[in-house]
Amino acid sequence: YSFSPVEEYTGKRLEDARINADLHRLFDWQRKFAKVDITGTAKVDGEDAYVVVFQPEKGSRSTEYYSAATYLLLKREGTVVSSTAGVELPYSIKFEDYRTIDGIKLPFRMIGENAGSGRSVTTITSVKHNEPIADKVFAARKP
């Protein structure tokens, strides 16, 4: 993030980042997670949803809510672990405004909430697949 200090991830925080950065983590869920359970149903903003709990071997447990009508991800809940203090803070992210881009349904609005930074809304304005990206975009910032 451009608005927060540089933090080097270690331990559980690093494992959580690795798991969450994998765009295809659910395709290989049996290797990525020690346990996955469908625990029931719940309402997410009035919509029926399946509740799925993911427990990785080394990372933090998370709960995802999938629409019973469309099977799209509606919400994710979990904890963010501090690399240095070991404190776990709860978070939630809602996924909204799904649009089809090149045959792929993507959420164009995400609403995140956590105790550290409050409520944040991310709105995507456009998506382009397979566009070249300069390596410097991924270079580490200096502290």
Image (cartoon, grey):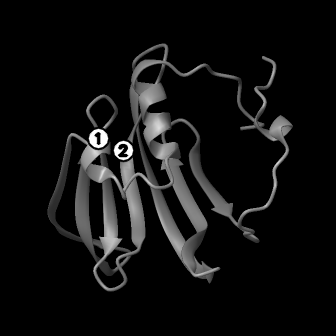
Q: Of the residues under marks 2 and 1, which one precedes in the sequence?
A: 1
Q: Is residue 124 left or right of residue 71?
A: right
Q: Which mark is residue 78?
A: 2
Element at label 2 = strand
- Please tell me in which quadrant of the rendered image residue 5 appears: top right
Q: Residue at x 28, y 44 (%)?
A: 31
The alpha-carbon separation of the residues under discs 2 and 1 comes to: 6 Å
The residue closer to the viewer here, 54 or 133, is 133
Q: Which mark is residue 61?
A: 1
Q: Is residue 129 or residue 94 the one in the foreground?
A: 129
State whether residue 84 appears in this view: yes
Residue 24 left/right relative to 44: right
Up-down: is 52 above or below 140?
below
> Going 81% across and 19% down the picture, which residue do you hit?
142
Q: Amino acid at mark 2?
A: Gly
Image quarter (top left, top right, bottom left or bottom right) of the C terminus: top right
Residue occupying the far top of the picture? 84
Residue 89 lies in what quarter of the image? Answer: top left
**10 Å neighbourhood of mark 2: few (<14), some, or many (≥20)?**
some
Q: Are marks 2 and 1 in contact (CB under 8 Å)?
A: yes
Is disc 1 placed on a helix, strand or loop?
Answer: loop
Residue closer to the observer: 113 or 71: 71
Mark nearer the viewer, 2 or 1: 1
Relative to 63, is 1 on the left or the right?
right
Residue 81 seen by the camera: no
Q: Name the quadrant of the N terminus.
A: top right
Q: Amino acid at mark 1?
A: Arg
Residue 28 tag number: none
